Amino acid sequence: MALFERAFQNRELHDPGFFRAIFSNTWLAPLWLLARLYLGYQWLLAGSHKVWGEGRWIAVPGPDGLALKGFWERATAIPEQGRPPISFDWYRDFLTFMLDHGWYQWFSWVIALGEVAVGIALIVGAFAGIAALTGAFMNFNFLMAGSASINPLMFVLAMLVIFGWKTAGWIGLDRWLLPALGTPWQPGPVVAGLAERGRREAYAPGVRDRDRGAGPPVPRQV
């Protein structure tokens, strides 16, 4: 029993040195910049075709998302011979559900604007880790729908940027955003200051009485 307790006692496991050198060293920020710019350019290019291109998905005469509808129909089709584009039945049922309910009309806006937003965020280096995570999630869904193209490469690069989120945007806006805003587990001075101000206002004299509906104290007449 003592051996079992020692094996599962609270302890902190540290990353190896090479892992910290790759993903936490600001000297490698130029490499992360190249990865960010490539990913950002690809997402911005893909999103711009859907938003402003001739074959755009949104803001078109008639229903929006007809191109997305066609993509989902091809992905969910089961050929008489050969392997279907989607390997997992649950994902095919999910896309079929969205098709049957006409979700492509509003989901096309989510994809088109999301690709543009991810591209811009990666290029300027603003919240690079979150942008890369969003892009990787879209790559994952394209792969699940049977569309390979450059999605595997973009997915791998996005995962590397996620691992290096602390330095991926060092040559970018994250150099100032992350120290100022911090993280959910370690708020920066801006977030901490706003939280402290909110606590002070909540516990200021008379605030709790006003929240309860009590008015100002009435002076006693002598």
Image: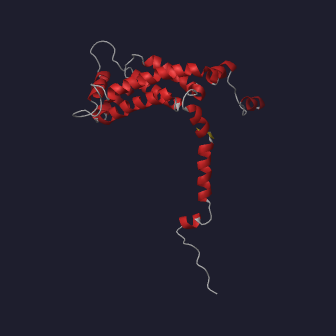
The quarter holding residue 89 reads top left
User: Percent from the top left, x then y, of residue 159?
Assistant: 52, 23
User: Percent from the top left, x then y, of residue 143?
Assistant: 41, 21
Which residue lies most toward the bottom here?
222
How many marks do you count on the picture? 0
Q: Residue at x 59, y 49 (%)?
A: 194
Q: Is residue 75 left or right of residue 116?
A: left
Q: Quadrant of the N terminus?
A: top right
Q: Residue at x 54, y 32 (%)?
A: 173
For residue 216, above or below residue 20: below
Q: Is residue 92 left or right of residue 23?
A: left
Q: Quadrant of the C terminus?
A: bottom right
Residue 152 versus residue 89: which sits nearer the camera? Answer: 152
Which residue lies most toward the right here?
2
Q: Is residue 28 left or right of residue 90?
A: right
Q: Is residue 183 visible?
A: no
Which residue lies most toward the left here?
62
User: Percent from the top left, x then y, of residue 56?
Assistant: 29, 28
Q: Residue at x 60, y 53 (%)?
A: 197
User: Percent from the top left, x then y, of residue 46?
Assistant: 37, 24
Q: Residue at x 66, y 23 (%)?
A: 20
Residue 127 versus residue 186: which sits nearer the camera? Answer: 127
The quarter holding residue 68 reads top left
Q: Is residue 202 visible?
A: yes
Which residue lies most toward the top here?
82
